[in-house]
Image (cartoon, helix red, strand yellow):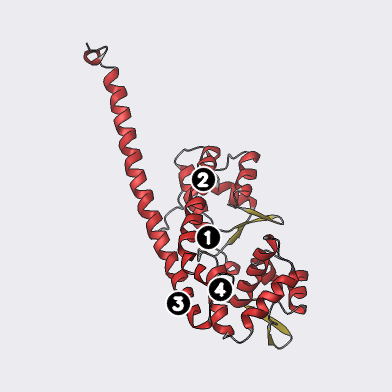
Amino acid sequence: MPKKPAARGAAPKRSPRTAQRSEYSIDDLARAGGSTVRNVRAYQDRGLLPPPQRRGRKGIYTQDHLARLRLIGRLLERGYTLANIAELIAAWEQGRDLRQLMGLEAQLTRPWSDEVPITISIVELAKAFGGNYRPSDLARAQELGIVERDGLRFRVPSPKLLAVGSEIVGMGIPLGELLTIIGGLRRNVERVADELIQVAVASIDRYGDELPPAEDVPRLAAMIGRLRPLADKAIESEVSRAMERALSRFLGDRMAQVLDHLPQYRNPR
């Protein structure tokens, strides 16, 4: 049978180099954690990051290393020093089951989505964007984090979002307007996510300034893990409801416009 032609604006296929991984080289770890190789080595020297597993002459890093690296980065963003972070990690490890605490750390810091980023060329990106995008559209897409420049190529953190955007652009909706909508959507979703997290972590606040005891860590990690799919379902439900209301309003407004142009309905008295 002949192959079906690819849909217009379809996202490029994922290359083998983008497959999901549970092990990282030091370069891959630094890239995935938004850091540098130099920083990774410095964190190891200070005891902030566990040493890699050794496989011959190669150092192998895992998801636990990635979770710790992301945690360090977020604490640094909040103004903590490396000395502060070292004290915190030491407090976590002292007299506690490190494996349990690492489980909580991983739940708090792992990516919310399980999507695997892809890397595409400028030609593939142009096809995904409809081929007629403006430089300002590309700049806006980078500002929103939809694409990230990676040398002469582009990294796509969410192939799913790129595929959806590509299909919508293929329907004739201008890319610039779509990016404006995505920007507004992101602000609203981030506000809701902040409020949801604040409510969810209220159960942790009873510990005050102390770290939770080891026996409570599995329960807290499980709670955070369950929150992820529940949040996805809630958001999907609310988006569906909002779309139904928007379509209903659109249909009502359009019907009213049609009726307003019919002679028998003009200027009723």
Residue at image mark 2? 182
Task: Say whether marks 4 and 3 touch (CB < 8 Å).
Answer: no
Task: Say whether marks 2 and 3 touch (CB < 8 Å).
Answer: no
Q: Which numbered disc, 2 or 4, marks the residue that appears first in the sequence?
A: 4
| Residue closest to the eye, 259 or 57 | 259
| Residue closest to the eye, 139 or 233 | 233
Are there few (<14), some (14-19), or many (20+) residues within 10 Å of tag 1?
few
Mark 4 lies on a secondary structure that is helix
Nearer the observer: mark 2 or 3; the answer is 3
| Residue closest to the eye, 163 or 206 | 206
Residue 68, x across and y down, in percent: 63, 73
- The three-letter code of the residue at mark 1 reads Lys
On residue 219, which mark appears?
Answer: 3
Q: Quadrant of the C terminus?
A: top left
CA–CA distance in space, label 2 to label 4: 29 Å
Q: Residue at x 38, y 54 (%)?
A: 236
Nearer the observer: mark 3 or 1; the answer is 3
Q: Which numbered disc, 2 or 3, marks the residue that appears first in the sequence?
A: 2
On residue 106, which mark appears?
Answer: 4
Residue 109, x across and y down, in percent: 57, 68
Nearer the observer: mark 1 or 2; the answer is 2
